[in-house]
Structure formats: structure tokens, C-alpha cells
Amino acid sequence: MTAIRYLLLAAAALLSHQAAAQGLVTGKVLDRQTRQPVPYASVVVAGTTQGTTTNAEGEFGLRVARLPAKVLAFSLGYGRDSVTVAAAGPTPPLALQAAPVALPAVEPTSYAANLLAHAYRVLQRTNARKLYGQAFYRQVTYLDQQPTQLLEMLWQTKASSAGLEGTALSQGRFAEKKGMLISFNNLSNFTKSLTLYSPANDTTKLGSVLSPEPTKMYTLRLLGVSQSGGQSLASIEFVGKPKFNPQHVRGIITVDVDTYQLLRFQVGIDIAVKSNNPTFKFKDERMNYDLVFAARPDGAAPDHMLVTLTQNIGRMLKPDLQMHAVGFTYFYDWQPTAAAVTYEPAGSKQKDLDAIKQKPYDADFWRNNPVVKRTPLEEETIRSFEQSKSFGTILTK
């Protein structure tokens, strides 16, 4: 009996040790010089596939399977920093040093055009290799700086080295304040539809900046080459030439100069959205995209994406309202094989809210999921929606 009791106590002690040796690690990633947050930086556990990204405030939460562990933080255009974490809870801030930028001793425009042409060919070569993973998407809509809508979804995803190709909804929820002037429920369509290469619509025919002749329709400027995480990164600004540029397209592309993998695509473009309400119209509409890729031997994979729509709402006999909607997507757990789901391609006519209503709302799932990272403002918004039972009521009507 004594021996059995001893074994039970030993087993309990072992379980207690294992429980203490894992947990949620939280922290913040800062710019070492300015001490400002580094949004959407990568945070990983060294030697494992465990990782996450910081949110818009540079904050992160990372579930670590075994402690102590070394946690690394890095981001494009920065060096790396690390901290050894002994226990769950907050860590000291991780500080990233901005990478120095230099211009190569070559003719900048020709060098930039050559890099983009090579990046285009890499997209051609790697596009057939598909990746399957998961993604967390959050959309917040603001009217005159006040949050009025919140939409969150977890997707099963299909992608290539050129962007997202299909999604299947796993979980979702939506809430909005009552009596709002407009409801914007489908910003995610802009996330789903940004694919930088398609064999069916060769980018040379569309005049894309990623093409064999990028200077045909765009003016290029090499901003510089920096060293980041062992990679040499070239940043190239592109502006549509006036003859081809009624939408005022302007952006920056980041390319690995050794592998020619596309690592970041940032672009702003004017758009036109029609209102179905005769009492107001949209003005000064601008869409901004920021798609970041993670380098892989078989072709880059989407890492995270930020889509922002800004516009003014002109009203009869009333001051204009400023609206902006922000959609952030974090991709993770890429695998070479598809899940047993049906991936809806970009352009599907099903609206986000209609798809979400088909899923029961699970408050515990959202509250305890470490992938669901929130800024303090988002936490406040979510609490206000939950306190008014918006999530539960809107999805059970």
C-alpha cells in the first residue's frame, strides 16, 4: 500500500512538473531605437514549429509546450532578438534593431526591374505547389474613429507562393452597434482576391508590376538593400505611369536578392464603391494592401496580410463621416496536403455574415484560443459587444 501511495505521489509530482513546464507566454516586440511597437512581427519558439505574430500594438501571446524555452522575434527590415523564458506569463520586451539600408553599386532602375522580372519567374515556377493551413481573420469597422462593427473568422486555407486561393470557414462571429449608418460585412473579399500571379490570367496581360517588363507601365525606384535574418532584401517602390494609372497605384515590393522570392507586397489604389442608400454617397475611397510572405525552399507562403479601406461618407445637409475598415489575417500551420473541406475560391457570392450565421457561437472557443490576438482597444470592443449579448443574439435570430 505504501509503495502504491509512493507511486501515486510520484506520478502527481511528475504531472505537476509537466503542467508547470508549459503555458502561455506573453510579451511585446519593440523597435530598439524608437521603442515603438513592431506590428505583425514573427515570434517563434527556437527549434520548434510553434509561432505567432504580434498584433497592431506589437503584443503577442504564444502557447509554449515546454519550458524553459528560447523565444525569438524577427521582422522584415529588422535583425533578431531573443529571450529565454523559464515560466508562463509576461516576458521582458524583445527589441529589434532596424537593418541598415544601402544602395548597390549598379544602375538602380535596371537593377530593380531585373529583380522584379526574376521574382515574376519564381512565382511562375512555384505557383503549382499548393499549401494548406489555417488563418485567423479580424475585421473592425470605424465611423469617425469609433468602432461600430467586429467580425472574426477562422478559416481552413489554400494558398500558393502568390497568395490566398481558397477558404473554408471553421468558426466565425459578428456583432455591430445598433442604428449604424452603414454595415460593411465583406471586406474579407479583398483579402481573398489578392493573388499576385495566376496561370489563367498571366500577369503580363494585366500589366502587373510583377512581369518580365515591369517598367512598361510603372516607374521604379530602388529604395535600398538591407540585411535581415541572414537575407539580403531589396525594397523597390513602384508608381503607375500617368497614362496607365487612373487609380493612382503606388506601392513597395520587397524581394530576396539571392532567391528572388517575393517577401512583401504593399500597394495603395483608388477604388469606387456604390451606395445603395440615396441619402449619402462614398467619396475619396482608397484601398491599401500589405501582404507579407515567409520564405520557404519550395516557394514563399503567406504569413500575414493587412487590408485597410478608408472613405468619406457624404450626407445631405450633414457633415461628412470618415469611415475606415481594417482586416488583418494571420496564416499558420501550413501543410502540403488539403483538409477534408471544400475551399471556396475568391469571388464566391456567399457573404461573410450568411456563412457565420450557419455556425453556432462558442464563446469559450474565442475566449481561450491563443491564436486570437487582440489589442487593448479590440478587447474593449469585444467586451462591450459580449456584455450586450450581441454575438449570441445576432447569430440566433
Image (spheres, helix red, strand yellow):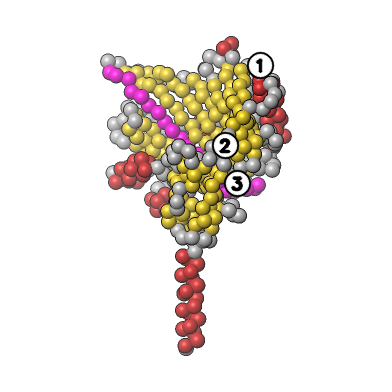
Quadrant in which residue 376 is drawn: top left
Q: Tags 1 and 3 in contact by the CB under 8 Å rule?
A: no
Please count the marks in the image: 3
Q: Secondary structure at mark 1?
A: helix
10 Å crowding of disc 1: few (<14), some (14-19), many (20+): some
**Quarter of the figure with the C terminus:** top left
- Residue that badge 1 annotates: 216
Residue 311 falls left or right of residue 162: left
Q: Position of residue 86 (x, y in %)?
A: 48, 60
Query: What residue range appears in magenta?
Result: 318-337
- Residue that badge 2 annotates: 99
Kindly identify the amino acid type of the residue bearing the numbered disc 1.
Answer: Lys
Kindly identify the amino acid type of the residue bearing the numbered disc 3.
Answer: Trp
Q: Is residue 143 above or below residue 231?
A: above
First reached walking from the N terminus: tag 1 or tag 3: 1
10 Å crowding of disc 3: few (<14), some (14-19), many (20+): some
Label 1 – label 3 distance at C-alpha: 36 Å
Label 3 – label 2 distance at C-alpha: 28 Å
- Residue that badge 3 annotates: 334
In front here: 339 or 18? 18
Q: Tags 3 and 2 in contact by the CB under 8 Å rule?
A: no
Query: Is there any visible trace of residue 167 in the rendered image?
Result: no
Q: Residue furthest bottom?
A: 1
In front here: 332 or 267? 267
First reached walking from the N terminus: tag 3 or tag 2: 2
Q: Secondary structure at mark 2?
A: loop
Q: Position of residue 158 (x, y in %)?
A: 60, 41
First reached walking from the N terminus: tag 1 or tag 2: 2
Residue 322 included in the magenta stretch of the image: yes
Q: Is residue 391 above or below residue 203?
A: below
Residue 237, numbered circle: none
